[in-house]
Amino acid sequence: MADASSLKNRKILLIIGGGIAAYKTLDLIRRLRERGASVRAIMTRSAQEFITPLSVSSLTGEKVYTDLFDLTDEAEMGHIQLSRSADLLVVAPATADLLARMATGRADDLASTALLATDTPVLAAPAMNVRMWLHPATQRNIAQLRQDGVSFAGPNDGDMACGEYGPGRMAEPLEIVSAIEARLAEKQGPLKGVKALITSGPTHEPIDPVRYIANRSSGKQGHAIAAALAKLGAETLLVSGPVNEPDPLGVTVQHVQTARQMLEACEAALPADVAICAAAVADWRVDNEAGQKLKKENGGLPELHFIENPDILATLSKLNHNRPRLVIGFAAETQNVIEHATAKRARKGCDWIVANDVSTDASGAGVMGGDMNTIHLIKAEGREDWPQMAKAAVADKLAQAIAAHLTQTKGQA
């Protein structure tokens, strides 16, 4: 039997197809959770004829995704990010129809779209009638999927629900767990053993119990970076200000409100190998925070006195003890982006600055809180100008750059 923590912090996206074997996925989820894995699930329309989304949700502890065109779900987690945030996609039961759609690149529902829109490894557990399994069309699809890099658990020989006997019976849950462990062990990730600290979102600096100072940061970029680092094997801590983004799977998240709380959480997380300050920390706070809601009286205006907040990026960059090997800051600018970001890198003492233009353009692509970013990565040795891309793609590219840098500088201290 596998060790109880063998899948600790691994992120599984389980795609449940429509077959009688769907009931086995309930036990599969339980076995995965026992081993420390986080599980999110997509159910096809046919799968819901055999088991309910409620039963799956109660075992995963997560919302179950079913509809490609559910705009609420798209706002919470797009189908692309849903699949890319996982360490492994597991299709169980993988019906003959679902395997055919995978092999031919169909994308006509949420399950097939998620499978097509990812570069994450895929493991399939086929389940179907023996004649369907042995049919030349199914065997061609299996051969194509193997060539595409999909791995398989089963099917087994056994009695079928239809009364026939032979290959086509879905592998048992513990067999699938073993296949998952083996597939994940093939690639531990270039950041295995690396401890990463990321800040994300805005901070809220209270004026009184009702009002606060904040900014338009959504946390989308910082959360995406945390997920990308965890996907490459890093032990990842995300210190997040108030956001509407879901906590990334496989990432330890600490929620804070103010800049002082964020700094305290970062200092407590040290030592770390890499620190990425993606949060848009409020520069100032009031030093005369009111204990009760401020009232308008006789048309007068309240007098607010501002003081500077602690500078988290500069604090981490200039540590004499426990300074991370790589400290990365963000510079959200509305003008003279390169000049301001370059000066910020020198002033703060960090290693890299990720500069992004958040001024409003015609498409709104660069607006703070949006879904796209145009990045300039500024280092001591020069600058990289990246094309406009989705924030998830920015996160993946930055994570790969971090992995390459830490590999090159390993042993240098």
Image (tube, rainbow, N blue to C red):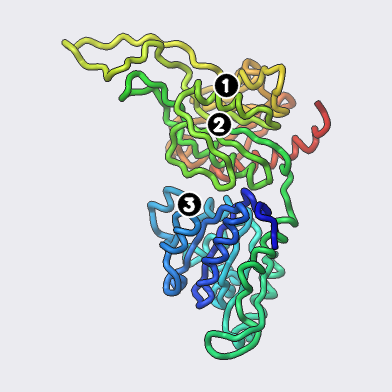
Please identify, in this view, whether the residue under mark 3 or under mark 1 is nearer the observer. Answer: 1
* Element carrying mark 1: helix
CB-based contact (under 8 Å), mark 3 and mark 1 = no
Q: Nearer the viewer, residue 203 or 359?
A: 203
Q: Give how far across and how far down residue 70 sits, in percent.
A: 39, 57
* Residue occupying the point 36% across, 15% down: 289
Q: Give how far across and how far down residue 19 sits, in percent.
A: 51, 76
Image quarter in which the C terminus is found: top right
CB-based contact (under 8 Å), mark 2 and mark 3 = no
Is residue 136 among what the camera can see? no
Query: Furthest-right residue in view?
Result: 411
Q: Residues within 10 Å of mark 3 (few under 14, many from 20)?
A: some
First in sequence: mark 2 or mark 3? Answer: 3
Classify residue 261 as left or right of residue 9: left
Q: Residues within 10 Å of mark 1 (few under 14, many from 20)?
A: many
Classify residue 271 as left or right of residue 199: right
* Element carrying mark 3: loop
Per the image, the residue denoted by label 2 is 199
Please identify, in this view, whether the residue under mark 2 or under mark 3 is nearer the observer. Answer: 2
Is residue 346 among what the camera can see? yes
Per the image, the residue denoted by label 1 is 312
Q: Give how far across and how far down residue 286 sits, in percent.
A: 40, 14
Q: Residues within 10 Å of mark 2 (few under 14, many from 20)?
A: many
Query: Furthest-left residue in view?
Result: 298
Per the image, the residue denoted by label 3 is 78
Q: Nearer the viewer, residue 214 or 63?
A: 63
Q: Nearer the viewer, residue 362 or 329?
A: 329
First in sequence: mark 3 or mark 1? Answer: 3
* Element carrying mark 2: strand
- Placement of 128 over or under 336, stated as above or below: below
* Residue occupying the point 47% across, 68% down: 44
